[in-house]
Image: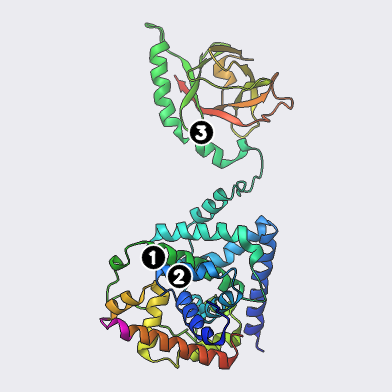
Amino acid sequence: MNASVASTAERTTALAQLLARTALADQAAFGELYRRTSSQLYAVALRILRDRGTAEEILQEAYVSVWHNAGTYDAAKSQPLTWLVSIVRNRCLDQIRRRDIQTVPLSRDDDEPELEIPSDSPTPVEMLLDGAAALSVRECINTLEGSQKQAIALAFYHGLTHAEVATHLRQPLGTVKSWVRRGLERLKRCLDRAGVTA
Amino acid sequence: MDLSRPDRTERLDALAAQYALGTLSPRARRRLARAGPSVPAVARAISAWEMRLAALAEAIPGVTPPPRVWEGIRARLGMAETLPSRGPWWSSLGWWRGLAFGSLALAVALAVTLFTGRPGEPSQAIVVVLAGQDGKPVLVASADRGSHVLTVKSVAPVDVAAGRALELWALPQGRDPRSLGLIPASGVGRVTLADTAGVALENTPALAVSLEPSGGSPTGKPTGPVLFSGPVSRLY
C-alpha cells in the first residue's frame, strides 16, 4: 500500500465521521462536510443541469436532505462520497425528467467528457476513492468499445435518456440501447472480477 | 413480482444499472425508487451500481459553488448566522455597512427639514432618520445645533410589547454606544442632551434604537435587538 492509498482511505474515513457527526446535528461537522464535498457535487449537478441557478438550487436541497438524513448513511454499504453523489444525481435526474425531454439542447460539438479517468493527474475526488478500486474502474472502463463509452458518458454526465443519446449521436434508438446495455454488462463483469463491488 | 428469484435478479440488475446511469423512463424510475427502501434486493442492486459508476462522477473536476449556496442551506435549516461574532453589533463592520441606506435617509432628512424649518431662519439642524432593516423610516430625530433638546418624531407605528421600552443610543466612532434616553413608541418625544446637540453628537456617525426592558437597559449598553438606526446628517 503506498502513501496515496493510505491517505485516500483516511479521507474516506474522515468523510464518514463527518457524516456520523452530522447525523448528531453537529453543525461544525456539517460545515466541514460541505467544505470538502460541495465542489464535487456542484460539478456533478452543473454537468447534468447545464444551468447554474438550477444547480445551486439542487445543491441546496441536497445538503438540506443530507442534514436530515445523515443518520441513514451506512458506511458498510457505500463510500460517503458515492452516497452524496447519488443524492445529488438523483435529484438532478428527477429535475430534468420533469422538463420536456425532447427540448434539451446539446450541441453535437460539445466537448464530451472522456470516460477515461486521467491516470497521471488524479482529481481530488479520485484520490478519495480507494486506490485499488479506482485503478480497477479505470482499467475496466478501458475495456469498453468507443461507442459504448461514448453512449454511457453522455447518459451519465449529461443525464440524457436513451432517445436523447440516440438523437445526439444520430444513431437508431435500438443501437444506442444495446451499446449502453452491453457496455454496462461488460463493466460489471470486469469490476466484479476485480472485486470492486460485492 | 418477487425480485429475489434468480430468474428475476438479472432483470433487476439491468433496471438498477439503468437507474444508476439515469436512463430509466420517469415512470420506471419512480417505481424503482419507491421499491428501494422496502425491498432489500432492489436497494442492494441500486447501491452496487451506484458504486460501480461512482468513479465516473468523481472524475469530474470540482467547481466551487458561490458562497450564497452555503448561506442558503443554513437559512433553510434555520441555523444561526455563521459570521464569527468578535464583539457586539456596534463594533461589527457589517453593521456599519448596513448604514449605506444613508443616502436615501439623507434625502428624507432634507425633505423633513424643509417641512419643519421655520422660514426666514437659517437652518442649523442635525437630522437623523431612523429606519428598520427594510429601510423604511420609522423615527425622525432632529435638533438645532445649539439646542440641548433632541426631538424624536414617530413617522410610522411601532409595536412595543408591555414591559418593554425603546432606548435611543448615540454610536460614537470607535467607542461604545451612549444612551441618550428612552423614547415613546408614538407621537413626539424629547430627549435632553448633556450638551448642545452639536457637541453631544460630535464624532457620532449614527444613532440607533434598541428594544430594552421598561426603564431602559440595565447594563448601560444595548441589550435588546436593534430595531432602527440611521446616519446623523448635519445640515450646516
Nearer to me, B131 or A135? A135
Residue at 50% over, 87% down: A119
Label 1 Cα neighbours within 10 Å, binned few <14 / some 14-19 / many ≥20: many
- For numbered disc 3, what is the local secondary structure? loop
Which amino acid, by three-letter code, is at mark 3?
A: Gln
Q: Is residue A174 magenta?
A: yes
Residue that mark 2 sits on: B29
Which amino acid, by three-letter code, is at mark 2?
A: Arg
Q: Which residue is at the far left?
A: A170
Q: Are marks 3 and 2 on the same chain?
A: yes
Quarter of the view holding residue A84 = bottom right
Q: Position of residue A16 (x, y in %)?
A: 66, 70
Depicted A69 relative to depicted B3: above or below: above
Residue at 48% over, 83% down: B11
Q: Are marks 2 and 1 in contact (CB under 8 Å)?
A: yes
Asked if residue B79 lies left or right of residue B233, the reply is: right
Give the number of the mark in front: 3 or 2: 2
- Any mark on residue A12, and which? none
Quarter of the view holding residue A107 = bottom left
Instruction: Provide the residue span drawn in magenta.
Output: A170-175
Q: Position of residue A101 (x, y in %)?
A: 32, 67
Q: Are marks 3 and 1 in contact (CB under 8 Å)?
A: no
Mark found first going from the N terminus, 3 or 2: 2
Q: Are marks 2 and 1 on the same chain?
A: no
Depicted B130 relative to depicted A10: above or below: above
- Any mark on residue B133, and which? 3
